[in-house]
Amino acid sequence: MPAARGVKRTASKSSAATASTGPKNKKKRGAIQLEIPSAPKKRGCVLTCGQGDVGQLGLGEGVLETTKFKPVSSLGNKIVDARAGGMHTIALDSDGKVWTFGCNDEGALGRPTAGDADEGAPRAVALPRAAVAVAAGDSHSAALLDNGDVYAWGAFRDSHGSMGLVVRGREGKACREPVRVGVGEPAVAVASGGDHLVILTTSGSVYTMGCGEQGQLGRLSQRSASRDARQGFSALLVPSKVTLKAGASQIWAGYHATFALDAASEKMFAWGLNNYGQLGITGEKRKTALFAPMECDAFAGNTWRAVAAGQHHSLALDRAGVAHALGRCEYGRLGLGEKSGDAEVLEPIPKLQNKKCVCIAAGTSNSFAVTDTGEVYAWGMGSEGQLGTGARADAAEPQRLSPAALRASAGGQHSVLLQEDPTAQKEASPAPEKETEEEKIEPVEEKRPSKRQKKQEQDEEISSTSSAQTADVTEVKPEKINGNEKKEPETQTETETPMEVDENDKSQENKDDKKIEEPMDQTDSEKSQDTSSQDTDVETKADVELAETAETAQPAESETAQSAQAAQTAQTVTETEVNGTVETKPVVLTTA
């Protein structure tokens, strides 16, 4: 998944993680002070490729797949960052506005939608201030605002299905509009894994929330990381602090993993799934899930400026701009050529050794790199056209693409490039298309399977949205189906139906004001006594004000009894205006 933007100290200028030289850490403990970054300065156009069956390409309903990158013309040329999620895309423009398009089954778009056409068209998300960074996971999105606030929307998923984003009583609840995630101090970076969110604050503290089944939260024992544990959803969905002695200066998130650069020593630490050695942690911890931060011995002896992690592999960019790969080799995702085994140590990618890379990106099973001259290279799984090479073939080595770009992002089955527009600084760019009056219709109330459910049926229950079981450390070689990795059927006999949020149920949304507990620091007693801890309920209060305008046309009165029998009864029509640009006041989630 995409890596979080890097952070600088107060005296430094902020820049993208893959282009940053990183902070010079002070030796004195407690002296670390990170600044809220500004948004990237260079702007341009968004290009997408790969699978687009749920609108994640933003190219219109007629484009279900493309093997070459095509521009999302409706976004104009003012975009400064764009990220690919599991089945959606999020973009940030130079004015600080956030745009989304793709699958909205669980609220990943953060805005009301009135059908497939609305979901696939880039539209704005309502936020109270300008955003400076964005992140996208499998079914959730997040934005960092210019005052250090973090807003998130959508839902996390675990092996049981949807687990929501916030706690409601003793259950998790998905959020279809942005909610503020408070951690007690301003944030300087956000990073999304497949189903977890990582937040870095000005003091160097790291907070996590979401699914923790593979240890990706880094603050719960294996037993406590289940929704069935005593603390239930509150232990997972309330952002809480990870224990790092010196704090962190940068963070990155992979599908089932989290990386943090130590603020004092600049050593790399990681936690999460390591079944292919993708964390760079060897020895007795090899091929296990790590539930607490550990130093990555494979990263020793070098200094690092960026990390990008997919489902079972990781990429790392050193200070010299050399790209390295680690983990599972299948489908060519490491870019090391026709390699027979997995990489247990970080290996330089041969075809890129003479290039100075400034950006790396890892999708589920594919990878990208962008050089300082704008050259774009792609490799790994390409069965859905997600490499942008013009073919549906895998690539064992980096393949140079024709479009130049500033940065790249890779998702589940699609990829995104940001291409600099030399005229963007001089000419005004067209605003993304807005809804017409005809599009302002209420979503049809007909019950139907979600797009995600349909896709799972088509892919024969491929699990691209939920975490693998912890015991699944020796994974069977999957088949490629629709761009995902097919796993053998789980041994569990029953699967919980993913939580669904009815977009038509406005009364329910009115009650969904988001208020969350104060972040909880992890203690030793909490780790060792998780089985005897008290059940935790999170009280929430409703403070969301949503306005709806509804006009109801009364049935026509019959003129005579005879004409009433001949004519059909007039129908009652209810129209609800849906503002595509989402100008409503966002929901605010504050810590108690």
Image (cartoon, grey):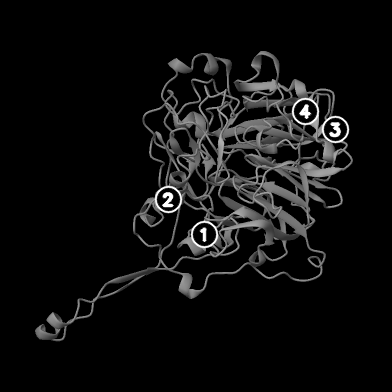
Please state which of residues 365 and 87 is positioned toward the viewer in this rendering. 365
Residue hosting label 2? 450
Residue hosting label 3? 24
Determine the CA span between mark 3 and mark 4. 24 Å
Residue hosting label 1? 119
Q: Amino acid at mark 2?
A: Ser
Earlier sequence position, callout 3 versus callout 1: 3
Residue 59 on image: x %, y %: 60, 63
Q: Amino acid at mark 4?
A: Leu
Residue 584 on image: x %, y %: 51, 60
Residue 251 on image: x %, y %: 70, 35
Tell me if mark 3 has few (under 14), some (14-19) or many (20+) residues whose alpha carbon lies within 10 angstroms of its own: some
Determine the CA span between mark 3 and mark 1. 43 Å
Q: Secondary structure at mark 2?
A: loop
Earlier sequence position, callout 2 versus callout 3: 3
Q: Amino acid at mark 1?
A: Glu
Residue hosting label 4? 346
